[in-house]
Image (cartoon, helix red, strand yellow):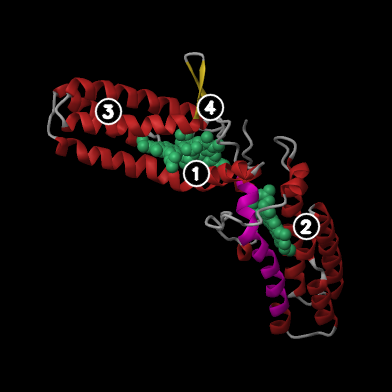
Amino acid sequence: MAQVFGRQHVGAIFLAALTIWSGPAVAAPGDAGIPTAELAPHYKGGKEGHAYTRAMLELGMRTGAATTAALRNDPERIKVALRSLREQMVKVGAMVPSWRPYFRTNLIDELESAVTAKADMATRRKIVSRFENSCTNCHARFMFQVQAQYRWGSFATAVVQVGGKELTFHQLMLDLASSLGAVRGDVESGQLTDARAAYQRLMDHFSMMEQLCANCHDQPRQYFIDSSVKAHLYKMGGLLRRGEKQVSEYTPLFNDVNEMSCMPCHQVHMPAAFLQRNALEGKP
Ligand code: HEC
Ligand code: HEC
Ligand code: HEC
């Protein structure tokens, strides 16, 4: 159930310089992937958040404090901030041993020496940006995979109850697509009675899909199944009731449903869903 945490907190405190979108960094076949045995213990627990996520957020805050201090002239504050950052790096590094090499503290040493030697700002800035790159490099490779795996909620177990039976997310999608295709096929062949039945199935599947959102989203979402998408579906129903036989009357409505609902929702959810699916298949 609901494994989605408030991304808005996360976004607000995440350093702008580190913000990246790593959507396409999906495991390719043969990709070493992420060390799930080491990560999984840090992704237990519920609403209070996951240990690894919290440790990263803390690392982000301490990085922000330390890099800001390092670009000012306040040697005492710099020392304290760098020490606190170093402690957190060691802590986070120990949580996932395979990734420990990513958390080398040598750049912090370098920054500290530069500050002690009163190096100019350009020199310090360079070290800071090398340090920030060490974060971004790992994020670009692994962050999305970790989030899809542990923080998205599971598409495999998202189900809806229909007449006492469980319908999986995947099956519902296939049903949705076939009923949509069937409406057009039936109109094309002039079978309006069949088209109306297919339309009824389409509407049933669409409302079942709406129930699936609550598997992961606590609050209703504004897009993909909203009233403007539904208005297009109702218009389709109106044409069928009127006995409209011209496929061209329906075509813009099919296109709009695809462009407002199916495709944008796929762009948001499919990378995570398919990454989860591949991870499951990878298991012996
Ligand atoms: C919640 C957003 C969402 C909406 C809205 C949505 N889909 Fe999907 N759909 C998904 C996700 C996620 C998957 C991949 C997960 C899976 O199939 O197990 C998927 C998978 C599919 C698949 C299977 C693809 C494959 O390669 O097996 C089809 C077909 C499909 N959707 C059709 C549709 C159609 C048609 C619509 C619009 C009427 C639609 N979907 C609306 C999220 C959505
Ligand atoms: C070895 C890999 C790795 C390194 C190195 C790394 N991180 Fe992360 N970081 C992650 C992963 C994986 C996540 C996703 C965790 C999650 O969402 O539960 C993450 C998430 C974060 C987040 C939360 C971002 C969000 O929008 O969800 C912050 C902030 C963060 N890291 C800061 C840093 C900083 C600062 C550094 C460098 C000092 C750093 N990280 C180095 C792997 C790494
Ligand atoms: C298996 C989990 C899962 C299911 C099922 C699911 N979503 Fe999402 N969805 C997410 C996650 C995770 C995000 C990204 C983080 C967030 O927004 O919470 C997201 C993002 C979104 C976004 C974009 C950002 C936002 O929060 O507005 C929309 C819109 C959305 N989902 C709508 C839907 C709708 C509509 C359904 C049902 C038809 C649905 N989702 C089903 C997990 C899911």
| Mark before the other along the chain sequence, 4 or 2 | 2
Where residue 21 sits, quadrant-wise, is bottom right
Q: Which mark is residue 269?
A: 1
Which residue has dot 3 on it? 234
Residues 14 and 131: in front is: 131
**Mark nearer the viewer, 4 or 2:** 2
Distance between mark 3 and mark 4 Cα atoms: 26 Å
Which residue is at 50% across, 44% downward? 269
**Mark nearer the viewer, 3 or 4:** 4
Q: Which mark is residue 159?
A: 4
Distance between mark 1 and mark 2 Cα atoms: 29 Å
Which residue has dot 2 on it? 98
Which residue is at 81% across, 63% downward? 85
Return the x and y of residue 20 as percentages of the image width and height: 58, 61
Return the x and y of residue 29 as percentages of the image width and height: 57, 54
The amino acid on which the numbered mark 4 sits, given as a three-letter code, is Val
| Mark before the other along the chain sequence, 1 or 2 | 2
